Amino acid sequence: MDARQGKLLVAIIDQFIETALPVGSKRLLEAGEFCCSSATLRSEMARLEDEGFLLQPHVSAGRIPTAQGYRMYVRDYLEPSRHATVVRRRFDTLKEQYFKRKDQERVYEAVSLLAHMVPNVAFAKVPHKSQVYYLGLSNVLKQPEFQGDPRLVSEVAEVLEEHLSAMLGRIAVDEEIRYYIGDEHLMAQIPSCSLIVTEYQIRGEKGVIGILGPMRMDYSYNTVALELAADLLRSH
């Protein structure tokens, strides 16, 4: 196969890959890759067909590559590097979306684990976004303080659903365990509750994980549980 035939085979395969339609001489000339007559191209295409590299599905149709044509293409003419920039850009976008989704799954799993460990609400603010996962409201409902005051239950639920993310943005959080106990200016709606929080990082992005419950919570137990859950997130 000479250089012009090789160029022709590549052009036909590239166009067929893009369109899934038989490729004729007119379309090849319109693409501006060949400086010859339509008759010359048709003659070369017929020769490639005779050699088994192309196939003409119908008499009036253009050509499509055969398996032998594809084999020649990938063996002698394939240039992956010409698509590298586009493919890498697409890959990087999808990879970031993949890792963000995995980050969210990890955070949710850590919150679920913590909610099973403590008789309070476990929560975490997800890196990259303002979303806060929380689980364990049913744990709080079993506490005497809440069983005796249905209004407090409603207020805790409101804080979790509407104010927790903003609240976490106003407080000091680092890798130490921080305690906010009955802090009225912080949790004016639920002054009989306490919040304990700490920071974690995933791929360089900071998040917050913590526990919300009555002031009567077991601070020693909860501190250890929270540290273990935070370490689970920090360990990856």
Image (cartoon, rainbow, N blue to C red):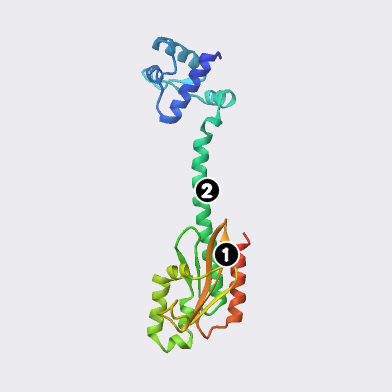
- Residue at 57%, 64% in the rendered image: 200
Q: Amino acid at mark 1?
A: Tyr
Q: Amino acid at mark 2?
A: Lys
Depth check: give the residue in front, 148 or 183: 183
Quarter assignment of residue 62: top left
**Please, is residue 17 above or below residue 137 in the view?**
above
Secondary structure found at label 1: strand
Instruction: Work out which quarter of the rendered image holds the N terminus and state it.
Output: top right
Percent x, y of residue 20 = 41, 30
Percent x, y of residue 58 = 39, 21
- Residue at 45%, 30% in the rendered image: 17
Q: Earlier in the sequence, mark 1 or mark 2?
A: 2
Depth check: give the residue in front, 172 or 78: 172
- Residue at 60%, 80% in the rendered image: 221
Q: Specify whether 11 is left or right of 233.
A: left
Secondary structure found at label 2: helix
Percent x, y of residue 226 = 58, 73
Depth check: give the residue in front, 126 or 183: 183
Quarter assignment of residue 3: top right
**Please, is residue 12 above or below residue 35 in the view?**
below
Q: Which residue is mark 2?
A: 95
Q: Which residue is mark 1?
A: 200
Q: Specify whether 178 is left or right of 144.
A: right
> What's the CA distance linking mark 1 and mark 2?
22 Å
